[in-house]
């Protein structure tokens, strides 16, 4: 078998792509916004907040966790979720770099 296409890109590029893909669904954005709103770890309340079935929400939570955007810890029989600072730090750094570049260009493009 040949190498995968992701092998042609840097670790940072692949990490950012995974983060962007995880955020590329409105349900996942809604989950992130809810976690910001409650400002604490939540255990199961997400199902009451979104118009989706529990298995669908679980799948979205799994994608966000695998990408490193949320953390999950077991508390009894439930998994409690909160935002993962490391994933969002990478996104923040990427957009700050873009912002810096755009400011230095001072609308001097096309």
Image (cartoon, rainbow, N blue to C red):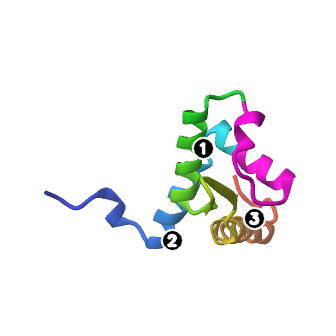
Using the numbered discs, state the Cα–Cα distance from disc 1 to disc 3 in whole angstroms: 24 Å
20 to 85, vertically: above or below = above
Quadrant of residue 107 in the image? bottom right
Query: What secondary structure is marked by label 2?
Result: helix
- The circle on residue 102 is 3
110 to 71, vertically: above or below = above
- The circle on residue 7 is none
Quadrant of the image for the N terminus? bottom left
Question: Label 2, on which residue?
Answer: 12
Quadrant of residue 76 in the image? bottom right
Answer whether residue 30 is visible to the viewer in this image: no
Of the numbered discs 2 and 1, the one sitting upstream in the chain is: 2
Of the numbered discs 2 and 3, the one sitting upstream in the chain is: 2
Q: Which residues are magenta?
A: 31-50
Question: Percent position (x, y) of residue 31?
Answer: 71, 45
Judged by depth in the image, the label closer to the viewer, 1 or 3, is 1
Query: What secondary structure is marked by label 3?
Result: helix
Q: Is residue 48 magenta?
A: yes
Question: Label 1, on which residue?
Answer: 24
């Amino acid at each position: 078998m040949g190498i995968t296409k992701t092998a042609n890109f840097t670790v940072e590029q692949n990490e950012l792509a995974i983060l962007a893909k995880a955020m590329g669904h409105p349900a996942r954005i809604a989950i992130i916004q809810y976690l910001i709103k409650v400002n604490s770890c939540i255990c199961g309340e997400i199902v009451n907040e979104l118009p989706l079935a529990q298995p669908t929400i679980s799948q979205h939570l799994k994608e966000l966790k695998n990408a490193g955007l949320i953390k999950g810890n077991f508390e009894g029989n439930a998994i409690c979720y909160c935002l993962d600072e490391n994933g969002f730090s990478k996104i923040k750094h990427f957009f700050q770099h873009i912002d810096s570049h755009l400011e230095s260009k001072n609308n001097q493009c096309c």
